[in-house]
Image (cartoon, rainbow, N blue to C red):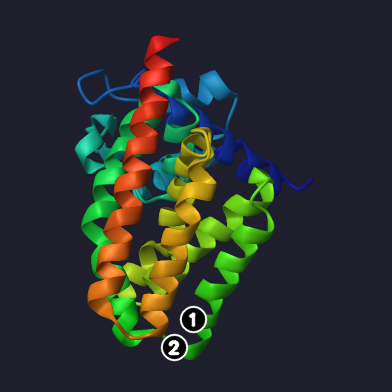
Amino acid sequence: MTSDTASLNIAQQIVDSLGRRIVRGDLTASGPSLVEQDIMMEYGASRNAVREAVKTLAGKNLVRSERRVGTIVQPAAAWNLFDPQIIDWMLSDDSTSAELLKALSELRMIVEPAAAALAAERATHRQILELLDCYDGMCAHVDDDERAIPYDVRFHETLLEACGNPLLRSLAHSFGLLLRANFKLSIQVDQAFLRNLEDHLMIAEAVRDRDPVRARQASITLLRKNEKDMEEVRAASAAS
């Protein structure tokens, strides 16, 4: 392993460690600034590795650096919550995952019905086929969560991509990471996956038929069911 590779690996380890600590609330905006020399000593890292790690964290809006002060943790409102690594950190910690998934439910109700309506107007023939193929994949693996969920996630990613809006399209991947976690929980509710299958078909058929009103309503129906399932999961978790 070359020195450059080793330094990069250490930098990535620092990013992962500090990122998780920030997201978990161990390091906060109201706490002391992070001193470069202290980070070097804690992780046994070179100055270059620490600076590379701080640069990466700053790119995620988790920290900012100020001369003569050091590296300051940013408040949660500044974080880039669509960054895949931040999503992973938040989902892997019980103290932050529930809040993130609740926010996702609200975001989906704001975005997805409108996205479904736009997709009905703008989807390409290939995207329509992909929606239907995803539905078929969900049906084929209805008794196998591990194989069914990727089709479900891809269905919703395709719906965003089919809007033809570059900003919505750029959200598709991060949206997919959140949806995967959402579905792994909501699928625990008895018959939830099977019960929601028909709604996916209704969305896909409305997009195929170029019917934005029907597509929007089918999306709302699905999202209301999903939120009810998530409420059951939260209630069961609280009871246990």
- Quadrant hosting residue 208: bottom left
Q: Residue 127 in the image: state x and y as whole percent.
A: 49, 81
Q: Name the outermost residue toward the top.
A: 240
Asked whether disc 1 touches disc 2, contact meaning CB atoms under 8 Å apart, the reply is yes
Q: Amino acid at mark 2?
A: Thr
For label 1, the residue is 127
Q: Looking at the image, which residue is at 53% across and 20% down?
A: 41
- Residue 218, relative to residue 107: is it above or below? below
- Residue 94, relative to residue 193: is it above or below? above
- Quadrant hosting residue 161: bottom left
- Residue 149, relative to residue 214: is it above or below? above
Q: Quadrant of the C terminus?
A: top left
Q: Residue 194 in the image: state x and y as whole percent.
A: 54, 49
> What is the secondary structure assignment of the residue under circle 2?
loop
Say whether residue 113 is left or right of residue 195. left
> What is the secondary structure assignment of the residue under circle 1?
helix
The label on residue 124 is 2
Q: Residue 239 in the image: state x and y as whole percent.
A: 39, 11
Q: Nearer the viewer, residue 131 or 74?
A: 131
Number of numbered callouts drawn: 2
Q: Amino acid at mark 1?
A: Gln
Say whether residue 155 is left or right of residue 150. left
Q: Quadrant of the N terminus?
A: top right
